[in-house]
Image (tube, rainbow, N blue to C red):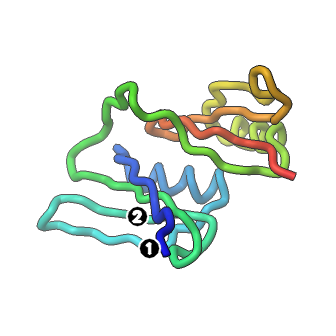
């Protein structure tokens, strides 16, 4: 059986990114692997174990503190029970809300967008 395993994001400060995804978005750091010969470190974060859940692979390449994102990448999406409350908590912690909570254009689903420390956009989607 095939399934989606992970999404990889290159980050400029590994601990800053781990803190954002774990402390602000409630994920767990699942594992970390430092590869000195390759000059990179990988950290995997997510809401469940890798055997049954899709996760995010945060890749830090030694000596690189930022990346140009280009125009091909869109966003990650996370389901939350209350988009407004989630945004309030993220904003209070210093996160950048780039689209305030409200219905999606031409629809009724409540969404918002937050940016992680490297500027990756994360859509928050109100679920149940």
Q: Residue at x 50, y 67 (%)?
A: 3
Classify residue 78 as left or right of residue 49.
right
Q: Is residue 108 left or right of residue 3?
A: right
State the residue at coordinates (61%, 62%).
27
Q: Which residue is mark 2?
A: 43
Q: Secondary structure at mark 2?
A: strand
Q: Position of residue 9 (x, y in %)?
A: 40, 48
Check the image and name the residue furthest to the bottom: 51
Q: Position of residue 35 (x, y in %)?
A: 21, 68
* Left-right relation of 97 to 106: left
Residue at image coords 51%, 62%: 55
Q: Quadrant of residue 42?
A: bottom left
54 and 83: which is toward the camera: 54
Chain-order first, disc 2 or disc 1: 1
Q: Which residue is mark 1?
A: 31
Q: Position of residue 77 (x, y in %)?
A: 62, 45
Q: Is residue 8 left or right of residue 52?
A: left
Q: Residue at x 68, y 25 (%)?
A: 99
Mark 1 neighbour class, 10 Å CA radius: few under 14, some 14 to 19, many 20 or more: few
| Mark drawn on residue 70 | none
Label pair 2/1, CB-CB below 8 angstroms:
yes
Image-quadrant location for residue 7:
bottom left
Which of the two residues, 108 or 82, is positioned nearer the viewer here? 108
- Answer with the quarter of the image where residue 95 lies: top right
């Amino acid at each position: 059986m095939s399934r989606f395993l992970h999404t990889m994001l290159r980050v400029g400060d590994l601990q800053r990114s781990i803190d954002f995804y774990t402390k602000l978005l409630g994920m767990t750091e699942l594992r970390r692997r430092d590869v000195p010969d390759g000059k990179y470190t990988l950290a995997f974060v997510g809401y469940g174990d890798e055997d049954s859940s899709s996760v995010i692979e945060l890749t830090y390449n030694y000596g690189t503190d930022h990346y140009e994102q280009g125009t091909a990448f869109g966003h990650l999406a996370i389901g939350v029970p209350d988009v407004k409350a989630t945004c309030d908590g993220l904003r209070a912690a210093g996160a950048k809300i780039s689209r305030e909570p409200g219905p999606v254009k031409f629809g009724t689903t409540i969404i918002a967008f937050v940016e992680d420390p490297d500027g990756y956009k994360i859509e928050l989607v109100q679920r149940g």
